[in-house]
Image (tube, rainbow, N blue to C red):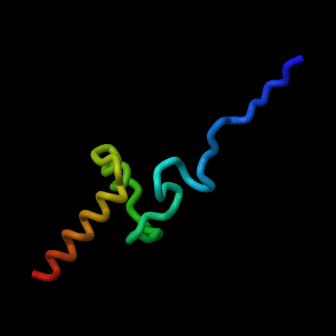
Amino acid sequence: MRIYSMKKATTKPPRGGSREGSGRPSLGKIRVNLTLNEALVEQARHRENNLSALLDRLLEQWLQNKKS
């Protein structure tokens, strides 16, 4: 009689995926809650895949304009 083990040969890291640092918060970024106009958010999502990156760029541009 043969007994087969279903145990995997490799084990996953304790947290996140296989990439170093995955599963951990991004360095230099914080989570914030915003209240935005729902209609404008829907329009933006149709044009932009990453809403967070869009808001980052817009905030950066706004801050640059305020320095001028």
- Residue sitting nearer the eye, 34 or 15: 15
Tally of marks: 0
Q: Is residue 37 above or below residue 33?
A: above
* Quadrant assignment, res 35: bottom left
For the point 47% across and 50% down, the residue is 19
Residue sitting farthest toward the right: 1
For the point 37% across and 49% down, the residue is 42
**Screen quadrant of the C terminus:** bottom left
The percent coordinates of residue 58 (x first, y second) are 24, 65
- Residue sitting nearer the eye, 10 or 65: 10
Q: Is residue 6 above or below residue 59?
A: above
**Lateral position of residue 33 relative to residue 11, left or right:** left
**Lateral position of residue 11 relative to residue 35, left or right:** right
**Lateral position of residue 35 relative to residue 40, left or right:** right
Q: Is residue 11 above or below residue 57?
A: above
For the point 33% across and 55% down, the residue is 40
For the point 43% across and 68% down, the residue is 34
Residue sitting farthest toward the front: 1
Residue sitting farthest toward the left: 68
Residue sitting farthest toward the bottom: 67
**Screen quadrant of the N terminus:** top right
- Residue sitting nearer the eye, 9 or 24: 9
The percent coordinates of residue 10 (x first, y second) are 62, 40
**Lateral position of residue 34 relative to residue 13, left or right:** left
The percent coordinates of residue 14 (x first, y second) are 63, 55
